[in-house]
Amino acid sequence: MKCIRCRERAEIHLRQHNSAFCRTCYVFYFHRQVERAIHKESMFTPEDEVLVAVSGGKDSLALWDVLVALGYRTVGLHLALGIGEYSATSTEKTEQFARARGLRLITVPLASEGPGLAISTVATSTNRKPCAACGTVKRHYFDGVAAEHGFRVVATGHNLDDEAARLLGNVLRWQTEHLAKQSPVLQPNHAKFARKVKPLFRISEYEAAVYAFVRGIDYIVEECPNSVGATQLVYKDVLNRLEAAMPGTKLTFVQEFLRAGRPAFVTAEAAPPPETCERCGMPSYGAICSFCRLVAEVERKQETRRSAQSG
Amino acid sequence: MRITLLPQHKEIDLPGRRRVADVLRQLGMLPGTVMVIRGDELVTEHDFLEAEDTVEIRSVISGGLSVTAPR
């Protein structure tokens, strides 16, 4: 199999694009794909400083690498989630990546935040599923750190497979409000929020992993232990079976939803949160935001435990 | 050939020369869900693996909940 650009031996075969590349031409292809997505969706410009949410996994580190290579101004944001060895390794990989390239990284160790917000602690204290607790905590810190440091754009490493799986989940339940908001660019509906962008939304998981590999990025290969049995993995499996039989299915599913499907669900701009959280000062739909309600539950649980121990 | 599966860190031995696509089929893996790495190079599903090759098959699937679900 030959590279379609230079005719050297191909290392990478992209069935959905009916293309094959050597690693040099693959990096060129990957950069061009990401650059096109950023331009076409008006995600940001070279004048913006972009806060890149980095987990230590292949997608977010590939995203940070490509944005730097394309000349964008970036700062990394890593949340040390406090999920045992998995999080320790994730943090180590992320810090190594930033250090080796001289990039600025903001690390938030959740275990040291407030009453101690390691995901395992929050999930246990609040009887929530770890993934639900993790989502609430991540959203808060992405918004909070962006507001605190003046970033107007937050980029995440969500890829085509993530978007296709999420779309399938939303369609299966006809979650029309979620379908209206599923987009590679989520515009802020409040001055304190930043624009959320997903520059890899047309890049498959395989493409992101290959990019990380050929660029020599040392990412965490292990998966979060809490993701075992996650619904999203079931959707991904179904989509991968379809993709194997009909290459290009995932890309068409997402692209055509954005072009032809999503407009039917968008009724009006989402109203901005009308209140300000009494605890954290971030915009909120109630007197206390969902994150601070979570923190309050953790505090109550700890107080109960302390009382029981002292009593 | 000696195959290491990641992230499971499981090792498998398969005899003879085989096409990558056939190895993946035998292991119940779909193309596009794994990278097949021989030494420091990637191989496509059309390439052949030799009996004496040492190969890593690394999953590319990550999972969990989307963090940009609508607020």
Image (spheres, rainbow, N blue to C red):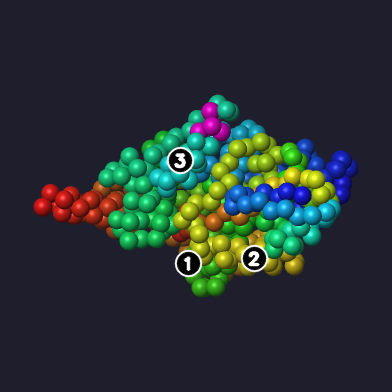
Q: Is residue A235 above or below residue B48?
A: below
| Chain ID of residue with mark 2 | A
Instruction: Find residue A112 and report its image quarter.
Output: top left
Frontmost residue, A250 versus A36: A250
Considering every residue shown, the one lying at the far right of the view is: A7
The residue at the point 70 percent across, 60 percent down is B27
Q: Which mark is residue A88?
A: 3
Residue at numbered disc 1: A177
Q: Amino acid at mark 3?
A: Ala
Badge 3 marks a residue whose secondary structure is helix
Q: Is residue A48 magenta?
A: no
Q: Is residue B11 left or right of residue A9?
A: left
Q: Is residue A142 left or right of residue A23?
A: left
Segment colored magenta: A95-99
Instruction: Find residue A160 and report its image quarter.
Output: bottom right
Which mark is nearer the camera, 1 or 3?
Answer: 3
Residue at numbered disc 2: A239
Marks 2 and 3 sit apart, C-alpha to C-alpha, by 31 Å
Q: Is residue A260 above or below residue A214?
A: below
Residue A252 appearing in the image: no
The residue at the point 37 percent across, 52 percent down is A120
